[in-house]
Image: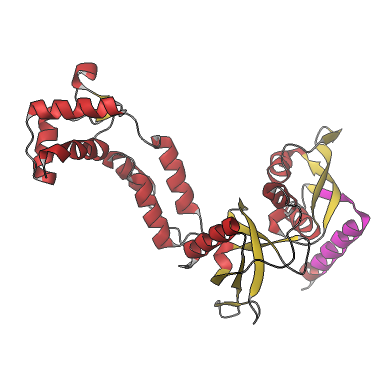
Amino acid sequence: MEKKTSVLAVLEILRQESDRDHPLTAAQIQQKMEQQYQCPIERRTLYANIQMLKEFGYEISTYQENGHGYYLDNRDFEESEIMLLCNAVHASNFIPRKHSNDLIKKLLATQSRYTAQKYRNMVYIDNLRKKDNQDFFFSLQILLEAVEEKCAVEFDYVQYNEKLQLVPRRTAPYVVQPVYLVYENEKTYLIARHEKYRDFSHYRVDKIRNIQKREALKEPLGPLCDPYEYAKTKVYMYGGEVLDFILLCHRRILDDIVDHFGREIQIVTQDPEHFITRVKGSREGVIYLAMQYAKWMEILEPASVREEMKAIFSAALSRYEKK
């Protein structure tokens, strides 16, 4: 390595080998320069390189300032941010294992090796629920391009069969115009428009296969919507008719109701333990929600959905009463 590029090697050593808890002495930096880059460096040149990096905007704490050594004090991400992002990637089932490991490696590269080791020591259980979908990031890239270029895409949309194999839902590919990508319900969804329908539809990106770009749909898109407002009405991302619901809920699930419908909802106290709220959501999604919280929630309106819930619970009770 030429001496004029040694400043980059010094920066890389400080980036990888130092942090506030692990400062490096000048002698240690010189030793690592020889071992890692075969570039002997005089102490005077080392000090000049560090000063040059500081003048360029890198926050480097020096021996004169801390009494211990040199370390890089500013990074693109705080350690807490990196831990949060890495854990989110590790826990995301829709990101394939290989891509997950590669992405975590890139995130950890912004920190010292000590932070990277701390993360590896914290996460010692493999996420066995990760999907084996090597097309995920390719599909994501094509969808991002399609949104920017305002073109349509065609793809196969898959589901599991009885042999637990992923197979296309139908013979003909889906053809839609991507509008938004949104993260909801711990999954990434494509929100799109179909040429034959004016309403939005949504698709799980991890279930998209064999995607290709096509020309824009002939029918204009029309007015767009807030993707997160759209997702908020699709409880558990169920599609279908969106209705106004009046719910009677126990106070212990108030946090869950806010998580699903947002802080814009209004609540009316029914008694010390219960409240009533009005929400907007997809019919199937709210039915599914009410089944999850059957012990703590009651649908008051619409009457048709209330009757449907009674039929569902009656059928379930009859099955459980069979000997």
- Give me the residue at 20% from left, 18% from top: 67
The colour scheme used here is secondary structure
Asked whether 310 falls inside the magenta stretch, the response is yes
* Quadrant (top left/top right/bottom left/bottom right) for the C terminus: bottom right
The x, y position of residue 236, in whole percent, is 69, 56
In this rendering, the answer to whether 25 lies above or below 215 is: above
Q: Residue at x 80, y 68 (%)?
A: 321
Answer left or right for 112 relative to 254. Answer: left
Choose top left, top right, bottom left or bottom right for residue 154.
bottom right
- Identify the magenta region: 298-318
Q: Residue at x 82, y 38 (%)?
A: 274
Q: Position of residue 241 (x, y in %)?
A: 82, 60
Q: Quadrant of residue 317?
A: bottom right
Residue 271 sits above or below residue 285 on the image: above
Say if residue 70 shows up in the picture.
no
Determine if the magenta segment contains residue 103.
no
The quadrant where residue 4 appears: top left
